[in-house]
RNA sequence: GGAACGGUGGCAGAGCGGCCUAAUGCACUUGUCUUGAAAACAAGAGACCUUACGGGGUCCGGGGGUUCAAAUCCCUCCCGUUCCGCCA
């Protein structure tokens, strides 16, 4: 959610920034919000005035009754009752207007950071680091690496999506044997690698409607999430959702910032808009495992944290012997809640494509305003100051299992058809260092 | 799922229709005293909205109701504790 007060004072700048996203409907939405805001403040003043008068009169009634002056008390009561009717009428209007305004605000996207490159679509996302490829670039991969992971998985008996489909539905996956061990090893490894700075959390996988609204999935993207209507709960699409809301409605101490969390969780996605895309293998599925990293920070800490978190993901990918590049998300491709975003992509030689394995994003105070997460401010001497400010949120996937799993199979496939497990995973592989062969 | 009891400021906890502008204690901040600290004493202190910056309004789990007036009474939902039932 963007700030109404900011909007009031800097409407032109905000509209201009939103226009960079290429969505022209923002202007009219902003205008409508401002109009509602004007009316709302008008009637709020009216209501408060009436309420102040009622408070005054009620005190008078109390005094009159104590004095035994019943007649006059009743006269004042009648006066107050009439004012009470005014107040309830105004309150009804107020409720309608503020609900309308809130609804509009929930649909207005975040303002892109000024350094976000202009662009219309994902085709305009620039590569900002890499690509880090073997000698010879994309053509430098050997012939035995050019087998898609779904074929490798089937040959080695470690991927059984056919049965996953039988048990559940299409677009569900199932790993077995060493394949399942590898998937779990990746999570263990990701958690251990980030434990130096991030507190491990094991959050609920189902959350309330309020929680899913805070992070921006609702109301706009309800079709993408699995709903458990009977209990008014939703399956999380990422651990970002519960982690961000851990401190919702709370006021944090500046000294505790930044707060850093990581969590392993299953992720559930209906993939409503992508039916028929990436249907083979592990590239896209309704349920997958992921380790997420997340930070709640003061505004001035955010830029450096963004850089740090991208670097962490890059180190992890490199340590697995995978080939990656970092792209920055341009204005036209930026998610609704995002202020600035970087994707880490891994090259999968078997299926011959760059796979998005992580997206690290800075949300400015957009999510924090929805979730109401604030912190106390301190002055230059570290003394607490009056008032509170919203925190900034950042998050990213430390490691999303399926695509990394796929890239490992394809990248580390040997000429004899076996697959070498990256050295860093050996503590988690029960002694398995090679699949097949 | 059933029953009982609860939910009040950072925490503990009183209040159970008007003097609540929420007692009291702890913690906190500032000052006095002190070489410094502690103790003692005094004062202060929250959040949110709005403002002609004088103020005004809101906040006692959420929502609704009764009343001139609700922390206080009624309804409803949520959460917690304890006991029972069920159960990894």
Image (cartoon, coloured by chain):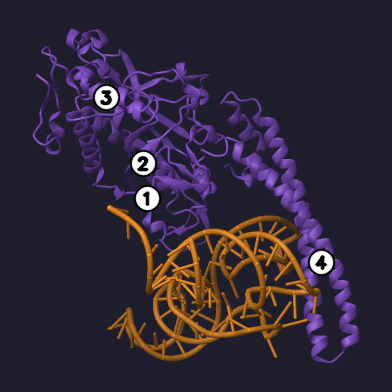
Tag shown at residue A2 = none
The relative height of residue A399 versus residue A117 in the rendered view (above or below) is below
Q: Nearer the viewer, residue B2 or B41?
A: B2
For the residues tagged 3 and 2, is the chain the same? Answer: yes
Q: Position of residue A422 (x, y in %)?
A: 15, 28
For the residues tagged 3 and 1, is the chain the same? Answer: yes
* Label 2 sits on residue: A305
Query: Secondary structure beneath disc 1?
Result: loop
Chain A, chosen colour in render: purple
Chain B, chosen colour in render: orange
For the residues tagged 4 and 1, is the chain the same? Answer: yes
Disc 4 to disc 2: CB gap under 8 Å: no
- The residue depicted at 78 percent of the width and 52 percent of the height is A93
- The residue depicted at 84 percent of the width and 61 percent of the height is A86
- The residue depicted at 19 percent of the width and 34 percent of the height is A181
* Label 3 sits on residue: A160
Query: Secondary structure beneath disc 2?
Result: helix
């Amino acid at each position: 959610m963007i700030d109404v007060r900011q909007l009031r004072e800097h409407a032109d700048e905000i509209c201009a920034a939103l226009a960079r996203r290429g969505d022209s409907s923002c202007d009219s939405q902003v205008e409508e919000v401002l109009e509602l805001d004007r009316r709302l403040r008008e009637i709020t003043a009216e209501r408060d005035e009436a309420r102040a008068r009622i408070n005054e009169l009620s005190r008078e009634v109390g005094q009159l009754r104590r004095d035994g002056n019943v007649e006059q008390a009743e006269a004042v009561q009648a006066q107050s009752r009439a004012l009470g009717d005014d107040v309830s009428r105004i309150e009804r209007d107020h409720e309608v207007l503020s609900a309308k305004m809130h609804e509009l605000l929930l649909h207005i996207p975040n303002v892109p950071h000024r350094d976000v490159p202009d662009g219309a679509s994902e085709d305009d996302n620039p590569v900002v680091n890499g690509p880090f490829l073997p000698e010879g670039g994309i053509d430098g991969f050997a012939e035995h690496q050019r087998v898609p992971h779904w074929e490798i998985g089937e040959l080695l008996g470690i991927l059984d999506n056919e049965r996953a489909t039988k048990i559940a539905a299409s677009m569900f996956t199932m790993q077995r044997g060493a394949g399942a061990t590898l998937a779990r090893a990746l999570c263990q490894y990701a958690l251990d690698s980030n434990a130096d700075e991030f507190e491990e959390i094991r959050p609920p996988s189902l959350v309330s409607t309020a929680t899913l609204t805070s992070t921006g999935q609702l109301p706009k993207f309800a079709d993408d999430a699995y709903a458990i209507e009977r209990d008014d709960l939703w399956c999380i699409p990422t651990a970002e959702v519960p982690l961000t809301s851990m401190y919702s409605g709370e006021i944090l101490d500046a000294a505790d910032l930044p707060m850093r969390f990581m969590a392993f969780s299953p992720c559930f996605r209906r993939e409503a808009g992508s039916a028929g895309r990436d249907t083979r293998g592990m590239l896209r599925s309704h349920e997958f495992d992921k380790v997420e990293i997340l930070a709640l920070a003061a505004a001035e800490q955010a830029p450096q944290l963004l850089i740090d978190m991208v670097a962490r993901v890059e180190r992890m990918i490199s340590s697995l012997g995978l080939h990656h590049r970092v792209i920055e998300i341009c204005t036209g491709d930026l998610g609704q809640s995002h202020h600035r975003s970087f994707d880490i992509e891994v090259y999968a030689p078997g299926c011959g494509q760059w796979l998005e394995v992580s997206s690290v994003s800075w949300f400015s105070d957009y999510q924090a305003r929805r979730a109401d997460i604030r912190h106390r401010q301190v002055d230059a001497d570290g003394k607490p100051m009056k008032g509170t400010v919203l925190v900034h949120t950042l998050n990213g996937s430390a490691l999303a299992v399926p695509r990394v799993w796929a890239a490992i199979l394809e990248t580390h496939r040997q000429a004899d058809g076996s697959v070498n497990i990256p050295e860093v995973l050996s503590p988690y592989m029960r002694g398995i260092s090679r699949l097949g062969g």
